[in-house]
Image (cartoon, rainbow, N blue to C red):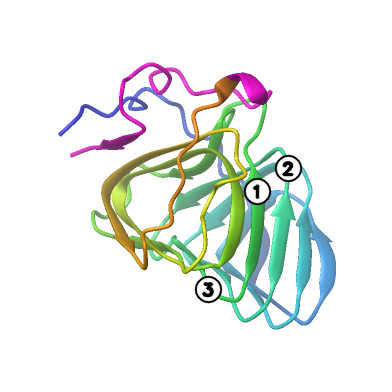
């Protein structure tokens, strides 16, 4: 066991709902940051580009399903409330890079520390090669089950979770080429000597 290296990180503010229970099916759209109450579902053949900023996933899941595609640079996801988790299914395409500045700098996913212990987040996609930044799930489990490499095109990917479960390979790649990206490494991550930290 390791101490939580990000325990002092301040959570981003959660304002009013930008959308409630939003489900995109077979759409090509650009989504703006904000609070997505009831979760966010992207399905079918949807192609979604995320504008830079913080996407708060509140009281519902962030689901990417079927053959949908989601891309975004300078984006972070804050997960808060009952059922706030993420799941990227096998046929999807995921390409995400964390913010370069602000409260979410270097954090691709930040689970609220008030979450119930044991929520499972899943990366099942066979095309999730760019996951640049830190996946911070202090109360959650991360399941990775893909037939092809995950995060191998990222300059770095750091993972801080309660538990990590690897299947089908495993095919998770954790690069530490910090100097190759302007996305900062959160204080407490770089130099800890472990690319993966399991926290209580």
Label 2, residues with CA under 10 Å away: few <14, some 14-19, many ≥20:
some
Q: Is residue 164 left or right of residue 50?
A: left
On the image, numbered disc 3 is attached to which residue?
89
Which SS type dominates the magenta stretch? Answer: loop
Q: Residue at x 43, y 26 (%)?
A: 9
Q: Which mark is residue 73?
A: 2
Label 1, secondary structure: give it.
strand
Tag 2's secondary structure?
A: loop
Query: Which residue is pictured at 54% across the width and 67% down the height?
Result: 125
Q: Earlier in the sequence, mark 3 or mark 2?
A: 2
Screen quadrant of the C terminus: top left
Q: How far apart in space, not on screen, are marks 3 and 1 (Cα)? A: 15 Å
**Residue carrying label 1:** 96
Q: Are marks 2 and 1 in contact (CB under 8 Å)?
A: yes
Q: Residue at x 84, y 66 (%)?
A: 29
Count numbered badges in the picture.
3
Q: Nearer the viewer, residue 87 or 193?
A: 193
* Quadrant assignment, res 143: bottom left
Q: CA distance from mark 3 to mark 2?
A: 20 Å
Q: Secondary structure at mark 3?
A: loop
Q: Position of residue 169 (x, y in %)?
A: 37, 63
Magenta-tinted stretch: 179-200
């Amino acid at each position: 066991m390791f101490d939580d290296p990000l325990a002092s990180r301040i959570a981003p503010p959660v304002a009013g709902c930008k959308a409630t229970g939003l489900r995109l099916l077979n759409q090509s759209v650009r989504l703006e940051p904000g609070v997505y109450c009831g979760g966010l579902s992207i399905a079918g053949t949807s192609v979604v580009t995320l504008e830079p900023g913080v996407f708060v996933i509140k009281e519902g899941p962030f689901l990417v399903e079927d053959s949908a595609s989601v891309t975004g640079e300078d984006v972070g996801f804050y997960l808060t409330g009952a059922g706030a988790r993420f799941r990227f299914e096998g046929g999807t395409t995921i390409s995400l890079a964390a913010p370069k500045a602000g409260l979410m700098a270097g954090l691709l996913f930040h689970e609220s520390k008030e979450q119930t212990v044991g929520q499972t987040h899943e990366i099942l996609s066979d095309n999730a090669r760019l996951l640049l930044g830190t996946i911070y799930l202090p109360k959650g489990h991360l399941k990775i089950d893909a037939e092809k490499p995950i995060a191998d095109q990222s300059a770095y990917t750091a993972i801080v979770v309660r538990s990590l479960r690897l299947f089908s390979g495993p095919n998770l790649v954790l690069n530490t080429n910090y100097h190759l990206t302007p996305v900062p490494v959160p204080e407490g991550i770089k130099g800890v000597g472990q690319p993966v930290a399991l926290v209580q």
